[in-house]
Image: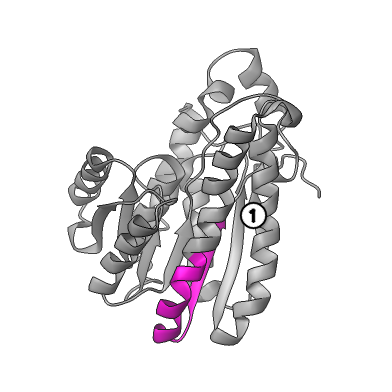
Amino acid sequence: PTRRSSDLFIRQLSYIPMKRLHGKVAVVTASTDGIGFAIAKRLAQEGAKVVVSSRHQKNVDNAISQLVDIGLKDNVVGTICHVSKAEDRKRVFDEAIKLGGLDILVSNAAVSPVMGPTLECSESAWDKIFEINLKAGFLLAKDAMPLFKKRGGGRIIFISSIAGYQPFELLGAYSVSKTALVGLTKAISNEVAYDNVTVNCIAPGIIETKFADQLTQEGPIRDHAISLTALKRFGTPEDIAGVAAFLASDDSSYITGETIIASGGMQSRL
C-alpha cells in the first residue's frame, strides 16, 4: 500500500469506537481476506457478533487468529462455507443461531476464473461465475429470511463491483454477474420491505487486494487505473468496510434497494 493509503487507514481507525451494532449478529461470506475480512473486522469492532467464513479451514483459522489478536475474541467465530453448497450455507447460519440469531447478511463471495471478452467465456466458466457471484447470493438471502423474521427485521448487503456499471474489458462475464447483483438488490428489496428487511448493495472500485493484483501492481496498468479515479488512488478494504457498517446499522434504516458506488470517483453509469 502507498504511504497515502496507509495514512488514510490510520485515520479511519479513530472513527471505529462507536458501537452501532451492539447486540447484532452478522454472517459475512468469503471473509478471511481482502474486503470480506475488513467488513467482518469492522462489524465486530462496532459490537456485532460475526460469523467469519471461507472455503478453507486454514484461512478461517488464520483470520480468527488475527481478529483475536486485536481484542475481538468475544465477537467472532469461524466456519467453513462454500457458498454454492447447501450444507455449507446451512452451517454458517447454524453458527449465527448459536450466537442468538441473524441480523446482518453480507454476501461477498465472488470468482473470476477466466479473463477475456464476454463472448469468449466458456459455458462452464459462465456457469461457475453466475453460480457463485449471483445464485449463491440469492440462495443466502432466501435462507436468511426466516431468521430475520424471528428477529423482527434485518439487513442484506450484496458486494457488487464498479465493473457492474462500467464492464472491464478483460472481465466480461464477471462484469455481467455484478450488474445482475444490482438487479437482484432492487427486486428483493421490494419483496422483503414488509418484514423490516433492507437490501442494499456496494459497488467497490479498484481496491488494493489480492483479487485486484493484476491492476494494482506497479506499472503502466496501475498508472492508467489510478488515472480513472477522481481521488487518484486505489481504495482500501477499510474504505468498503465503512460503507458496509453504515448499511448494517440503524443509520441506514431508510435506505433500501440502492447501490452505493465506492470507487474514488470512477465513471459509473447503467
Residue 202 falls left or right of residue 167: left
The colour style of the image is one colour
| Residue 17 place in picture, x, y as percent | 35, 63
Relative image position of residue 132 (x, y in whole percent): 51, 47
Tell which residue pokes out farthest to the front in this image.
Answer: 123
Query: 135 or 19, which lies in front?
Result: 135
Q: 249 and 119: which one is in front?
A: 119
Q: Give the residue drawn at x 70%, y 49%.
A: 179
Q: Quadrant of the N terminus?
A: top left
Q: Amino acid at mark 1?
A: Leu
Residue 1 vs 244, above or below: the answer is above
Q: Is residue 161 left or right of residue 265?
A: left
Q: Residue at x 38, y 67 (%)?
A: 18
Does residue 224 show up?
A: yes
In this rendering, the answer to whether 241 lies above or below 111 is: below
**Magenta extent:** 141-159
**What kind of element bears circle 1?**
helix
- Crowd rating for badge 1 (residues with CA inside 10 Å; few <14, some 14–19, many 20+): many
Task: Report the residue that reaches farthest toward the top.
Answer: 219
Q: Nearer the viewer, residue 88 or 195?
A: 88
Residue 49 counted in the magenta span: no
Question: Residue 128, position in %: x, y?
Answer: 54, 40
Q: Is residue 159 visible?
A: no
Q: Is residue 97 above or below residue 236?
A: below
Q: What residue would you read off at disc 1?
A: 181
Q: In the image, is 96 to the left or to the right of 2?
A: left
Q: Position of residue 244 (x, y in %)?
A: 50, 59
- Identify whether 168 is placed above or below 95: above
Question: How many numbered discs?
Answer: 1
